[in-house]
Amino acid sequence: MLIYFYWFLLFFFLIIAFISLYFTFIQLIYFYLPNRIGLAFSDSKVINLIEKIIEDYHLKNINNFIESGSGTGFVVRKMSKIGNFKKYIGVEVDWLIIFMSRIFSWLEKSKVSFIRKDIFDYKIPQNSLVYCYFTSDINTNLYKKGKFQNMVVICLTFEIERCFTDKSF
Ligand SMILES: C[S@@+](CC[C@H](N)C(=O)[O-])C[C@H]1O[C@@H](n2cnc3c(N)ncnc32)[C@H](O)[C@@H]1O
């Protein structure tokens, strides 16, 4: 019986080691790739901020909530529990991270769809509220490629350079 326990421990250790090595590897790779940002996670303060923006700017008639570069899907999964949007979508480029977010979503029985795609190749549906935790360069490139047309975009921390209009706040 004890032998099974040791096998289980070894398997568990190998999984954790693989995930840690993989994350370290992609952090390094993404650092050198254009339009990629590595892992960093939003916390519940962001959820409060998004809720406040929705409230203050009367954004209740928007159909879709999109988290671009959704990571483990923390924001979009939380929003799907408290928000009134019709659809919740997470777009993430990395296969392992999206696999993890789908497992979390399945465990929570959440109604979020996760799409594995580079955000630059994804056509963001009209009438969406988009949450981005990218660098200002990526946000600026997305803006210049017209990805944010007719959307409300909430960018965490990073402003969109040279794109200030009366519609930015
Ligand atoms: C800073 S993390 C933010 C994670 C999550 N949105 C959050 O706020 O907790 C950025 C995520 O975007 C993903 N990512 C980076 N470049 C991307 C791209 N071009 N298209 C889609 N996802 C991307 C990364 O794999 C990473 O999971």
Image (spheres, grey):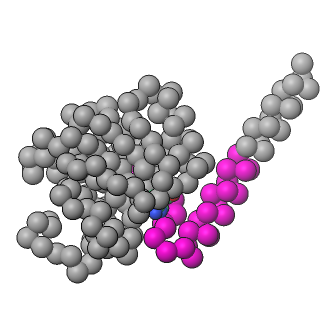
**As drawn, 159 above or below 39:** below
Is residue 64 inside the magenta stretch? no
> As drawn, is 32 to the left or to the right of 141?
right
Which residue is located at x 28 percent, y 53 percent?
130
Quadrant for the C terminus in the image:
bottom left
How many circles with numbers are drawn on the protein? Answer: 0
Give the image quarter of residue 137.
bottom left
Name the residue at 51% across, 55% down.
Answer: 93
Quadrant of residue 55 in the image? top left
Please tell me in which quadrant of the rendered image residue 144 appears. Answer: bottom left
Residue 13 in the image, given as x and y percentages of width and height: 77, 42
Q: Would you say residue 167 is visible in this rendering?
A: yes
The image position of residue 74, as x and y in percent, is 42, 44
* Extreme residue toward the top, this view: 1
Residue 19 x, y percent position in the rendering: 67, 50
Magenta span: predominant SS is helix
Which quarter of the rendering shows the N terminus?
top right
Nearest the viewer among 164 and 19 is 164
Residue 25 located left or right of residue 148: right
Q: Is residue 46 visible?
A: no
Task: State whether residue 22 is above or below residue 48.
Answer: below
Residue 126 percent coordinates (x, y)? 23, 50
Range shown magenta = 16-43
**Which residue does the image show at 38% across and 30% down from the upper left?**
111
Choose between 45 and 67: the one closer to the eye.
67
Identify the residue shown where x is 40% and y is 46%: 90
